[in-house]
Amino acid sequence: TPEDTEAVLEDRVLPLGVLQRPTSVQDAYDGRVAVQVRAYPNPTSAGATVEWQQSTPGHVTIELYGTDGRFIETVHRGTVQPGRISVPVMPRSSGSYLCNVIVNGIGTSVPLSVMR
């Protein structure tokens, strides 16, 4: 779990490519499918928008990480209804980031570059 990772590494990092619970064919029917996420404009000199199409109601968490995997901030946490979802993302400083979008427990990461 993210909590276990933080306890072991003594820092909050993005565990890329790690399954955090058993998965099954049934997951696709519970709204647990990966979504196609895009961030635009990218690169940006100010803020960006993270956008995807949501087919079922769900719980969403959007987190920003450095390219070294270190947690920076939680951008959004809440529920969404089906449709096109757009959430503003405004990193505080220039740099390269990974924006991790978790929809119904399934995460998708997209790169984001900020040049100020």
Image (cartoon, helix red, strand yellow):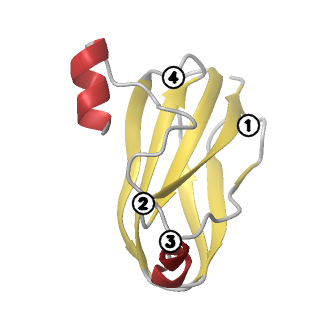
Q: Which residue is mark 4?
A: 69
Amino acid carrying mark 1 in the image: Thr
Q: Which residue is mark 3?
A: 32
Mark 4 or mark 3, whichever is nearer to me: 3
- At 55% from the left and 74% from the top, the residue drawn is 25
Amino acid carrying mark 3 in the image: Arg
First in sequence: mark 2 vs mark 4: 4
Mark 3 or mark 1, whichever is nearer to me: 3
| Quarter of the rendering occupied by the N terminus | top left
- At 61% from the left and 63% from the top, the residue drawn is 34
- At 27% from the left and 24% from the top, the residue drawn is 6
Q: CA distance from mark 3 to mark 1?
A: 31 Å
Mark 2 or mark 4, whichever is nearer to me: 2
Q: CA distance from mark 3 to mark 2?
A: 7 Å
Q: Secondary structure at mark 4?
A: loop
Residue 45 located left or right of residue 85? right
Question: How many other residues sit within 10 Å of disc 3, few (<14), some (14-19) or many (≥20)?
Answer: some
Verify CB contact (< 8 Å) between mark 3 and mark 2. yes
Q: Secondary structure at mark 2?
A: loop
